C-alpha cells in the first residue's frame, strides 16, 4: 500500500553562462527516490532573483539559444535603469526572472515526471556570471515503501 509522504531537498547547480540551459538531468540525478512515487507533485523553486526556471522544448539545441536571444531583446541592458550598483546585467536579470518565474510544479506518475515528450526543465541564467544556483525541490505524493 503506498504511503503519502513529503520530501524536500536542495540541489546546487553548477555555474552556467548567461542563457537558457536544460537542467532536467541535473534535477533527476538528485532525486533517485522519485522512482518510488506512484502519484504526486514536484515543486521546484530557485532561490535567486536574477535567474529563473521554465519548461520548454528539450530536443532542438537551437531552442535555448533562441530563448536567450529573445529575452535579451525583450529586456535590453541599454535601458536607463536606476538599480545599477551590481553591474549592467543585474537589473535586466531581475526583469527577466520576473517574466519567466521562480518556480515550477510538475505532476508525477509511476515514478516519472509527467512532462510532455518534447518538454524539459530549463535554468534561465540572466547574469553574465551568476555562479552556482540553488534549487529547493519539494515532492508530495503516494510512495511505494522503500526496499528493505
Image (spheres, rainbow, N blue to C red):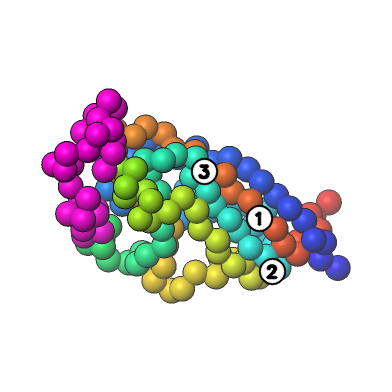
Secondary structure found at label 2: strand
Residue placed under numbered mark 3 in the picture: 135
Q: Quadrant of the N terminus?
A: bottom right
In percent of width and height, residue 138 lies at 63, 51
Q: Which residues are magenta?
A: 65-92
Pointer 1 with pointer 2, Cβ within 8 A:
no
Secondary structure found at label 1: strand
Nearer mark to the viewer, of 2 and 3: 3
**Mark sitting on residue 139:** 1
* Mark 1 residue crowding within 10 angstroms, few (<14) / some (14–19) / many (20+): many
One can see residue 7 in this view: yes
In percent of width and height, residue 71 lies at 24, 54
Q: Answer left or right for 27 relative to 59.
A: right
88 to 92, vertically: above or below = above
Q: Answer left or right for 138 relative to 11.
A: right
Q: Which residue is at a point 82% across and 61% down the rendered structure image? A: 3
Distance from the alpha carbon under mark 1 to that under mark 3: 13 Å
Residue 56 vs residue 45, the one in the foreground: 45
Residue placed under numbered mark 2 in the picture: 39
Q: Which residue is at a point 38% across and 44% down the rendered structure image? A: 51
Q: Is residue 102 magenta?
A: no
Distance from the alpha carbon under mark 1 to that under mark 2: 10 Å
Res 18 quadrant in image:
top left
In percent of width and height, residue 136 lies at 57, 44
Amino acid at each position: 500500500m503506498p504511503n503519502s509522504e513529503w520530501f524536500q531537498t536542495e540541489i546546487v547547480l553548477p555555474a552556467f553562462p548567461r542563457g537558457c540551459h536544460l537542467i532536467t538531468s541535473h534535477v533527476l540525478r538528485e532525486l533517485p527516490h522519485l522512482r518510488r512515487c506512484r502519484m504526486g507533485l514536484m515543486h521546484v523553486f530557485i532561490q535567486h532573483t536574477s535567474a529563473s526556471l521554465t519548461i520548454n522544448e528539450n530536443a532542438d539545441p537551437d531552442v535555448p539559444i533562441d530563448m536567450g536571444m529573445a529575452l535579451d531583446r525583450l529586456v535590453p541592458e541599454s535601458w536607463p535603469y536606476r538599480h545599477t550598483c551590481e553591474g549592467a546585467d543585474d537589473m535586466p536579470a531581475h526583469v527577466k526572472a520576473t517574466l519567466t518565474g521562480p518556480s515550477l510544479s510538475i505532476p508525477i506518475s509511476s515514478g516519472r515526471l509527467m512532462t510532455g515528450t518534447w518538454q524539459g526543465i530549463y535554468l534561465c541564467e540572466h547574469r553574465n556570471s551568476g555562479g552556482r544556483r540553488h534549487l529547493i525541490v519539494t515532492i508530495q505524493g503516494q510512495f511505494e515503501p522503500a526496499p528493505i
